[in-house]
Image (tube, grey):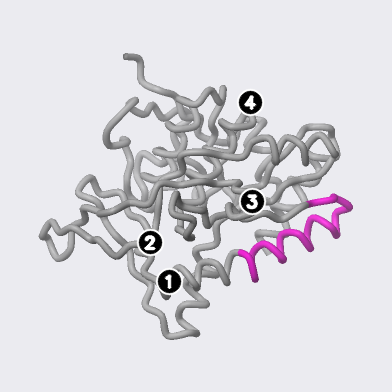
């Protein structure tokens, strides 16, 4: 399984003395559970083409069940099997992820621009970095995921890549690695040989690639770089040693465009 390969590689990096935080989402698990429970899985496509999950009340419940009840235990078990002491956290634990609830989303539906007001998601505004650094200092490997807690104390969904970027910035990480189902950022999404060694993103506005879920990863990459993370890499999570190969250069490095 891909998650086992990733965990084995993360464990190898951790045992090598490099502090690691593993942040995860779980779109496949969320979609699979939603289908079993009869909850429709829908996406919101912004006017700039960036796609995010539409999270109504039922979907929010599915997200919590899938991430905390399925994905995270699987990752923790895999890391334990590799001899790593890991601690699972959602954004709700000790206020790890605090977000501002989005009151409205602009989206394109059937070619028309609409405003969606019943989406339970938010944008991260604060991270309890002290919690993460305390765990790291104890030799533990934090495994973190959405959801987050909103300013009103209620639960909101948030994008896992952007959560990873926020955590990376909060703990002063040197490198953020975003794994995906492609060899990196592709010049042609239909040609895996077209992987870009470098992808430059504007400091604001639409990223250069928005298709195939890459738009939100590039937004997360930009947020990490602006928060002080020195290096952001996007790499193929399907490889046998995805983390170590990415750190060795098999990836796309994301850079900010010059002002």
| Image disc number at residue 59 | 1
For mark 1, give the secondary structure.
helix
Residue at the limit of the structure toward the left, as seen here:
112
Of pointers 4 and 3, the one earlier in the residue sequence:
3
**113 on left or right of 161:** left
C-alpha separation, residue under disc 2 versus residue under disc 1 = 9 Å
Residue sitting at x 44%, y 43%: 217
Cβ atoms under marks 1 and 4 closer than 8 Å: no
Of pointers 3 and 1, the one earlier in the residue sequence:
1
User: Within 10 Å of the Cα at label 2, are there few (<14), some (14-19), or many (20+) other Cα atoms?
Assistant: many
For mark 2, give the secondary structure.
loop
Residue sitting at x 59%, y 48%: 95
The residue identified by callout 2 is 120
For mark 3, give the secondary structure.
strand
| Image disc number at residue 174 | 4
**230 on left or right of 222:** right
C-alpha separation, residue under disc 4 versus residue under disc 3 = 18 Å
**Residue placed most toward the observer, 9 or 169:** 169
The spot of residue 5 in percent (x, y) is 72, 55
Vertical position of residue 92 compared to residue 251: above or below: below
Q: Per the image, is 167 magenta?
A: no
C-alpha separation, residue under disc 3 versus residue under disc 1 = 20 Å
User: Within 10 Å of the Cα at label 3, are there few (<14), some (14-19), or many (20+) other Cα atoms?
Assistant: many
The residue identified by callout 3 is 144
Mark 2 or 3: in front is 2
């Amino acid at each position: 399984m891909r998650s086992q390969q990733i965990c084995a590689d993360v464990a190898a990096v951790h045992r090598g003395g490099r502090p690691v935080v593993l942040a995860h989402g779980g779109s496949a698990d969320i979609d699979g559970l939603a289908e079993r429970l009869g909850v429709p899985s829908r996406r919101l496509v912004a006017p700039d083409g960036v796609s995010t999950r539409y999270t109504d009340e039922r979907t929010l419940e599915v997200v919590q069940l899938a991430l905390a009840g399925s994905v995270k235990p699987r990752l923790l078990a895999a890391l334990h099997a590799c001899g790593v002491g890991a601690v699972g956290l959602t954004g709700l634990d000790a206020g790890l992820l605090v977000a501002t609830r989005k009151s409205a989303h602009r989206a394109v539906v059937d070619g028309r621009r609409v405003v969606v007001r019943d989406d339970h998601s938010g944008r991260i505004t604060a991270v309890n970095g002290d919690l993460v650094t305390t765990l790291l200092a104890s030799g533990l490997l934090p495994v973190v995921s959405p959801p987050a807690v909103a300013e009103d104390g209620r639960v909101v969904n948030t994008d896992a890549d952007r959560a990873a970027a926020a955590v990376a910035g909060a703990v002063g990480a040197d490198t953020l690695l975003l794994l995906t189902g492609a060899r990196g950022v592709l010049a042609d999404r239909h040609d895996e040989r077209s992987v870009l060694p470098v992808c430059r993103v504007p400091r604001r506005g639409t990223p250069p690639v928005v298709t195939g879920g890459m738009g939100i990863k590039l937004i997360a990459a930009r947020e990490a770089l602006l928060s002080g993370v020195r290096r952001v890499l996007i790499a193929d999570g399907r490889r046998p040693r995805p983390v170590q190969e990415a750190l060795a250069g098999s990836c796309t490095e994301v850079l900010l465009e010059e002002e």
